[in-house]
Image: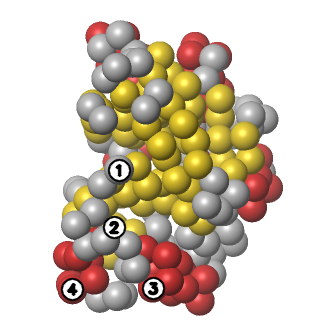
Amino acid sequence: MDMAFYVLPYGIFESNTYIISDDSSKACVVIDCGVEPEKILDMVGRNGLSVKYIILTHGHFDHIYHVKNLKEKTGAQVCIHEAELNLYQNPMLNGSRMFGAGRDVETVAPDILLKDGQKLQAGDMTLEIIHTPGHSPGSICILCDNMLFSGDTLFQLSIGRTDFPGGDPEAMETSLHNKLFTLDESIVVYPGHGPKTTIGYEKENNPYA
């Protein structure tokens, strides 16, 4: 399978937006949308891509801020884990008021409520949803081929905070050890903030491993 991969960093709170596409069909998936829609749409347009899904790794405002705009401009299906719906839709929980974003995030109703183990197909790409609560109740990681998009669950040498509403340190520990650190060590991890890493490197070096 031939894939193309793009990372757009420096979104809100330096969040990362990822675009992965299937070279044969030009179907693509946008993962999180804290980066300005113009940058996302420019990358999509320049490469002749068609956005099938907007997958939100969790509902905090720095990852969902532009979802309404992006949905309107692409017609893509918005996907978020079923356990994250309340946080996603509530500005008191998703951080848009707490962090003074200037306005409450305008969300849209999700088209797909995700479940653990669910698989989405975009062209020849298969994306497996891994439910990893801890940072928030419905946090997910997305496994596609040898790439793991870890949202705010796992970072290079760190993990996501668990002191926000819905955070759970025990759930985070279970997610890390039972869901992520059991994956193949060669898998490359692309987090919601910061640089890429690998499962093997984090198992060996992450202080929370």
Q: CB under 8 Å between callouts 1 and 4?
A: no
Mark 4, secondary structure of its residue: helix
In the picture of the structure, the residue carrying the numbered disc 3 is: 177
Q: Amino acid at mark 4?
A: Glu
Which label lies toward us, 3 or 2?
Answer: 3
Ranked by sequence position, the earlier of labels 3 and 2 is 2
Ranked by sequence position, the earlier of labels 1 and 2 is 1
Which label lies toward us, 4 or 2?
Answer: 4
The image shows residue 55 at horizontal and vertical percentages of: 56, 41
Report the Cα–Cα distance between label 1 and label 2: 19 Å
Work out whether 86 lies above or below 171.
above
Residue 155, numbered label: 2
In the picture of the structure, the residue carrying the numbered disc 1 is: 145
Which residue is found at the position 26% from the left and 73% from the top? 185
Report the Cα–Cα distance between label 3 and label 2: 14 Å
Toward the viewer: 28 or 100? 28
Report the Cα–Cα distance between label 4 and label 2: 14 Å
Which residue is found at the position 43% from the left and 74% from the top? 180
Split into 4 quadrants, where in the image is the C terminus?
bottom left
Toward the viewer: 39 or 52? 52
Mark 1, secondary structure of its residue: loop
In the picture of the structure, the residue carrying the numbered disc 4 is: 204
